[in-house]
Image: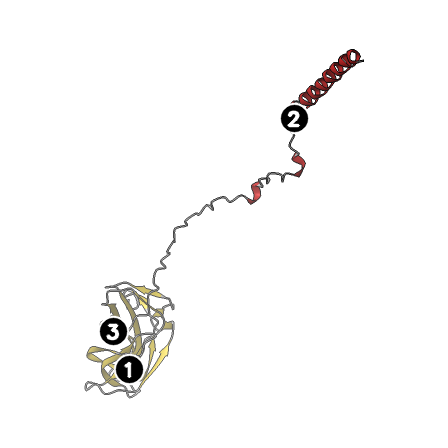
Amino acid sequence: MRLLLAPVLALAGALALVGCGGSSTGASQTVSSVDTSTQAPAPATNPATESTPASTTSTPATSTSTPATPGMCRAADLTASYLGGQAATGHGLLGFALQNVSGHTCTTFGYPGIQFLSQSAEPLPTVPNHTTTDFFGSLPERMLSVAPGATVSFRLGVTHGAASTAGCTTAYLLQVIPPNDTATLRIALPGGAYECQTATVSPMQPGTSAYP
C-alpha cells in the first residue's frame, strides 16, 4: 500500500506545480489599458475668438485756413481828396476820391453820405439824390475791393453859375460819410461850389473813373 501511494502523491505535486506556473504566466501577460472615453477633450481653437492685437491707424489732423473776408472800408481806413470840377450849361460836376491808407484790403459798395458846409464849417441845406445816371452819364453800382494804397471815387452833380435863380449858396467844404459807416471825412472845395440843396450822388467807382 505504501508503495502505491508514493507515485500518486508525486503526480499530485507535479500537477500542483503546473497549475501555479500557469497562474504566474497569465499575470505577467496582462496589459493595463487606459480608458480614454472619460478624459475631457482638448479645447478647440476658434480662430474667430483668438485675441489679435488691434491695428491702430493714426490719421494726421488737417487744418484748413479760410482766408479772412475783407471788412467794409471805414473812415479810419481812408483819406478823402477833391478831384476837380467841371461845368456845362448850368450843371456842375464835382469829383472826389477816397484812398485806402490802412494796411489791409477793405471793400466798399453803394453811395457815400454827403453834407455841404459853409466856409466856417456850418452845415448848409443838402438833399442828396442817389442815382446811377446823372447829367454827365451813367455809373453802375458795384462791389469794390480796395487794396492798401488804392483809390475809389464818386461824383456829385450840382447847379452851376453865379447867376442862378435858385438862390444857391457857396459851399467851401464837403463832409463825406463812406458807405456803410457813420464816421465822417472832410474835403475842402477850393474856390467854393454852388450848392442848391439838391445834388446827385453817384455810387462808388474804381480808381478815379467817377470823374472823367
**Secondary structure category for the residue under label 1:** strand
| Residue at screen point 29% across, 69% down | 153
Q: Quadrant of the N terminus?
A: top right
Q: Position of residue 138 (x, y in %)?
A: 37, 69
Kind of residue sitting beneath label 3: Ala
Counting every numbered tag in the picture gives: 3
* Residue depth check, mark 1 versus mark 3: number of the one nearer the observer: 3
Give neighbour class at mark 3: few <14, some 14-19, many 20+ (Cα, 10 Å): some
Residue 92 sits in quarter: bottom left
Of residues 34 and 163, the one nearer the viewer is 34
Of residues 57 and 153, the one nearer the viewer is 57
Q: Quadrant of the C terminus?
A: bottom left
Kind of residue sitting beneath label 1: Gln
**Secondary structure category for the residue under label 2:** loop
Q: Position of residue 31 (x, y in %)?
A: 65, 26
Give neighbour class at mark 1: few <14, some 14-19, many 20+ (Cα, 10 Å): many
Q: Which mark is residue 31?
A: 2
Q: Which residue is mark 1?
A: 115
Kind of residue sitting beneath label 2: Val
Pick whichever of labels 2 and 1 is earlier in the sequence: 2
Q: Which mark is residue 76?
A: 3
Pick whichever of labels 2 and 3 is earlier in the sequence: 2
**Secondary structure category for the residue under label 3:** helix
Q: Position of residue 143 (x, y in %)?
A: 37, 66
State how far apart marks 2 and 3 are (Cα): 113 Å
Residue found farthest to the right: 1
